[in-house]
Structures are given as C-alpha cells and as structure tokens.
Image (spheres, coloured by chain):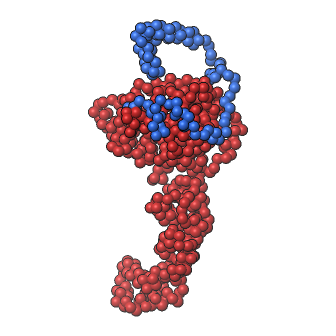
Chain colours: A blue, B red
C-alpha cells in the first residue's frame, strides 16, 4: 500500500497534529514503512481466524445501573482554564 | 419529471437508565450545568469506561420488539472527531458488530393501510455534551451533563417514501419504545432525535440517488416540514440538470429551510477502530430469553387484538393502542360499561378532546376509567340521553362528582315513563293542529322531515329529558 504526502497532511489535520514542512517528508516515509509491514500481515491467510477485537481472552463485565457518582463540579472546575455559570469555556466554535 | 423520494431515518433514542452508559453519574434531565459530569464523563486521564447492564438489557429488549437478530457478541468502537463537547476526542459507539441486527416493524397510515419498514441495525453509544454558543464573549460554553448518556441509534432501511410515512414511522417507533419502557420518548427533551437521509430518483428507477443528511429534526411536525423542503430543494436542482452534493444539512425551524453544514465536511472521516478500553460484550440465550419473557403486549399485537376482540376499525384500534396508559384506560372503560364500541367512541372523541384542549395526559386525567364507564352505562340503560351524557361528562371533568351524583343533583334523569311522555306528546299535537294537518297531507318523504318538528317540541317541553326513541315511537303511533 502506498501513501502520499497529501494523505498524511489530511490525517494530521483530522488528528489535530501539526507537522512542519521539514518533518512531513520524513513522517510520510516512516508511515509508508509501517504500511509495508501491514501489507506483509495482510498477506497471511486468515480466512479461518475469527476477527479479534481485543487481545485479552475475556469478555466485558457489566455494571449494575446505579448512581455512584456525586456532584464534584467545584473540584473539577477549580483546575479548568475558564468557567462561567457552571459551564466550561472554550474558544468560540463557529458552526 | 415525476420524482420518487427515498428516505431512511436514523433515530437516536435516549435509554431510560438511572446512570450513564459508562459511568455512575445520574442522567436526570435539566440539572445545573456540569453537576452530573464525573471524571469518566470529563475524560480525565486514566479513567476507564464500565458498561451499564441496563443499557444492554434495553437494547436487547428493543431488538426483540422488532423481531431482530440479537448479536451474542458485540463490539464497541471509537468514532474519532474533534469537538469541544466530546472531551475524549472520540465517541464510544458500535460500528462493525452492533448489538441489534436486521429487523422490521409495521407502520399504519391514516387511511388504515399499513407498510413494513425494515430496520438495518441498532447500536449502543454514548451521547456528547452540549455546546452553548451565546453570551460568552467569543467563547463557547460547554455543559457535559449529557455526555455519556446511553443512546440506542436505530437505523432504518431506505424504505420510506414520503413525509407522512416518515411521521408514521416515528410515531410507531415512539409507541413501541414507550411500550417497552426503554425510553420516555420525550422529543422536546431530546430523548428521541432524528436525522433524515433523503434522496430523489426518477419514478420507476431502482437505483438510489445522491442523498443529503438532515441533522437534528426534533419533532414530528419538523420532520414533515424538513422533508417537504428538502424534496423541493433537490427537485429544483435536478430539474435544472444539476447534481446533488452528498452533504450534511441542518434544518432551521425558524426559517423552514435546510442549509449546509460545511464545517463538518472534512471531519466526515471517523477512523473507527475497536475500543481498547472495553472487551467484547457477550450475552447468552438464557439472558436473551429472560428478556423475551418480560416483553409486554406490543402495539401491533394490541391493535390486532382490539380489532378482533372489540370489533374496532383499524384506525380506532391504532389510536387507542398508541400508548399503554391509553389502551389500559380504554379497556377499563369498555369492561365497566360492557360496550366496547361506545367506549372507544367516548374515549376518542370526548376524553381525548378534553385532554387535548386541557393539554393534559391520560395518566393525570381527572375522570377515571371506572367513572367514564359508569357514565356510559347510564346511556346504555336509558337513564340519560347521549346528549345529556356530554353535559354530565363536562361536570365530571370539573370534579363535580360521579355520573349518578350529577344526574341526581341536576335532575337530568331521562323520562322513560310512557305515561309522562304520552301526555307531553298529546299536548304538542293539540297545540300544533295546523302542523299535524300539514303532516297528514304530506307524502312519505316529506313526513320524515316534518316529524322532526314534533320531536323537537316534545324534547323542548320535557327539557331534553324525554327518551328520544320513545318519543319517536309514540309520534309514529299517534300521527296516523
């Protein structure tokens, strides 16, 4: 599988990771190498193997539907950069 | 050109759990901002999700309610996108292996016809928080109370063809989930939110056109309006030879239009992968069967039973089976008075009429089913006329007592005493000799109209208390 620099730029944007112009060539190169390894794995015949969602050989434990948490807003908001009227403030999101 | 509309709906249903899907925070609606957001909901470092059993239970219950395949092994995935009301930077959802697979259910149209709508899948996921864009000095306020509330996303097949069917589907779905007790279905509080996928194709074509997704259409009425608007928008573009862009649009109820949400275009690449913090959810047959046994009689079954058992038409049966409290109320009234058809009529016309005018719900109805049943019994045993009964009902609504008390207190007892009615009829006939002669000279067709005059006079003299049937019979005997 080949990967082009513009795809790396798109993924970086989606992931909110800033990659400088100096770095981008090297990053593309390294991800291409990882994808080569993925290609190698893809070549293995897996048609008898059940897809694995988690490496642990266990299943999810379920929790009873009980309220166990109390209101700790003051503690959480004491470490927030900006709050107002009980709301967390973030830079304006333009829709 | 004649266009066919193809519609698929995605409904986000808030499940009626006490606590959140992955944390022990409460899910009460309308709490002070961020007072129901725990460290897990805030995505504090090191926090891990633990799945709520009740959410799984409700999802399975829904699946059984639509006759769907239930996955004994389902997997949670991360749906990645950046938005401030999603603190983790991903939503825990299900992608490859949802808990509920293909199913279907029947919707009933107002003309009594029915259609089966396929359900593609239903999966569990967490809700995001709320962003408030007003009044914060160029900042957006974030309330994370809703973050982590359990949702069941129900995806329909593109089987819906017009706005009326979309509304019928939502109403049937609303009825089903409230019967099942898995959600309060309160659209105004966002417990049931709807995204509409809509495309057009030339009538007769079998390939699908390019669709637009309309987000967050949150009332039955808006769904109808948004579909009408979007149909027209797409038809105009296609008629002019243009192309529909696949995009997400937002319905603006104030302006009654849909508009593009350009900001989300790039973000439509969610890079799903299995959620490493949760293991696969495995349930067994015993678990599924125990939930199956707890299923109540569902709306469709109740509807057919009302038709078969009480001889109601499909429309009446549909209205009366819409919610469990209403269906129970109707059955109690029918049981009390012993005449299901009259009970059906009274519940739909008088009772629902009053409830709608008062904006009340059947649970808080001031007239109990037993009381209404007793009132109807007084019509059936000729104590009062149907017309009188409506007045009595009004008084019962105002809390003036039960039917018998009001009839007694107001002296509304219907006169079924032959002697008394006979005397009034005689008075009327002798006081109106000219009309009697006119009647006797008239032909059969005209007589039918003229007799109404005498009935009216008798009712007037008896203050409406004479038994109309007896009045008619006596007049027929005397006017020869």
B54, B131: nearer the viewer = B131
Which residue is the extreme one toward the front?
Answer: A78
Left or right: residue A57 compared with residue B151 = right
Left or right: residue B15 compared with residue A62 = left
In the rendering, at what x and y percent does residue B411 appear?
Answer: 52, 82
Which residue is the extreme one toward the right?
Answer: B286
Left or right: residue B159 compared with residue B52 = left
B30, B173: nearer the viewer = B30
Q: Residue at x 38, y 39 (%)?
A: B135
Vertical relation: B24 (above or below) B378: above
In the rendering, at what x and y percent does residue B412 appear?
Answer: 51, 80
Residue B2 shows in this picture: no
Vertical relation: B61 (above or below) B92: below
B386, B409: nearer the viewer = B409
Q: Residue at x 59, y 58 (%)?
A: B328
Vertical relation: B25 (above or below) B110: above
Quadrant location of the N terminus of chain B in the rendered image: top left
Q: Residue at x 50, y 8 (%)?
A: A30
Residue B370 shows in this picture: yes
B415, B469: nearer the viewer = B415
Quadrant location of the C terminus of chain B in the rendered image: bottom left
Q: Residue at x 45, y 88 (%)?
A: B425
Which residue is the extreme one toward the bottom?
Answer: B430
In the rendering, at what x and y percent does residue B406 appear?
Answer: 54, 76
In the rendering, at what x and y percent does residue B395 appear?
Answer: 50, 72
């Amino acid at each position: 599988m080949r990967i082009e620099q513009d795809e790396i730029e798109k993924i970086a944007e989606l992931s909110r990771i800033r990659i400088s112009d100096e770095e981008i060539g090297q990053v593309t190169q390294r991800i291409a190498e990882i994808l080569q390894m993925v290609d190698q794995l893809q070549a293995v015949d897996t048609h008898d193997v059940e897809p694995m969602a988690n490496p642990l050989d266990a299943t999810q434990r379920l929790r009873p539907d009980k309220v166990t948490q109390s209101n700790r807003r003051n503690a959480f908001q004491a470490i927030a950069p900006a709050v107002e009227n009980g709301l967390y403030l973030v830079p304006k999101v333009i829709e | 050109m004649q266009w066919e509309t193809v519609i698929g709906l995605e409904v986000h249903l808030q499940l009626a759990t006490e606590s959140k899907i992955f944390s022990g925070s409460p899910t009460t609606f309308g709490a002070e901002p961020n007072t129901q957001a725990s460290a897990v909901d805030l995505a504090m470092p090191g926090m891990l999700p633990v799945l709520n059993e009740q959410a799984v239970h409700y999802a399975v219950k829904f699946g059984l309610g639509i006759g769907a395949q239930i996955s004994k092994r389902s997997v949670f995935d991360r749906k990645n996108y950046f938005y401030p009301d999603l603190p983790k930077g991903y939503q825990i959802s299900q992608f490859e292996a949802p808990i509920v697979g293909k199913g279907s259910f029947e919707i009933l149209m107002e003309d009594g016809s029915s259609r089966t709508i396929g359900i593609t899948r239903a999966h569990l996921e967490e809700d995001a928080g709320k962003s408030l864009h007003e009044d914060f000095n160029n900042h957006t306020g974030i309330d994370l109370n809703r973050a982590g509330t359990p949702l069941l996303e129900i995806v329909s097949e593109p089987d819906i063809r017009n706005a009326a069917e979309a509304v019928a589907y939502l109403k049937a779905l609303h009825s089903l989930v409230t019967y099942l007790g898995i959600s309060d279905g309160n659209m105004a509080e966002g417990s049931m939110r709807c995204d509409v996928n809509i495309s057009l194709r030339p009538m007769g074509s079998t390939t699908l056109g390019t669709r637009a997704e309309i987000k967050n259409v949150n009332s039955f009425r808006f769904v109808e309006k948004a579909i009408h608007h979007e149909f027209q928008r797409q038809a105009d573009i296609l008629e002019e030879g243009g192309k529909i862009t696949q995009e997400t649009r937002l319905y603006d109820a104030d302006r009654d239009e849909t508009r593009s949400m350009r900001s989300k275009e790039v973000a439509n690449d969610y890079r799903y992968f299995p959620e490493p913090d949760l293991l696969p959810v495995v349930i067994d047959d015993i678990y599924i069967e125990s939930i199956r046994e707890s299923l109540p009689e569902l709306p469709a079954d109740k509807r057919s039973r009302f038709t078969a058992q009480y001889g109601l038409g499909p429309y009446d049966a549909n209205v009366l089976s819409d919610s469990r409290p209403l269906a129970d109320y109707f059955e109690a009234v029918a049981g009390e008075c012993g005449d299901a058809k009259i009970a059906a009529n009274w519940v739909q016309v008088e009772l629902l009429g009053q409830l709608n005018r008062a904006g009340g719900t059947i649970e808080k109805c001031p007239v109990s089913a037993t009381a209404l049943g007793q009132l109807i019994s007084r019509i059936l045993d000729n104590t009062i006329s149907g017309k009188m009964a409506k007045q009595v009902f009004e008084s019962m609504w105002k809390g003036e007592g039960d039917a018998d008390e009001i009839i007694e207190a107001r002296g509304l007892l219907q006169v079924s005493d032959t002697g008394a009615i006979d005397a009034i009829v005689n008075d009327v006939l002798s006081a109106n000799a000219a009309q009697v002669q006119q009647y006797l000279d008239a032909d059969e067709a005209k007589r039918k109209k003229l007799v109404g005059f005498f009935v009216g006079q008798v009712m007037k003299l008896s203050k409406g208390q004479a038994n109309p049937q007896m009045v008619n019979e006596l007049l027929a005997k005397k006017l020869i």
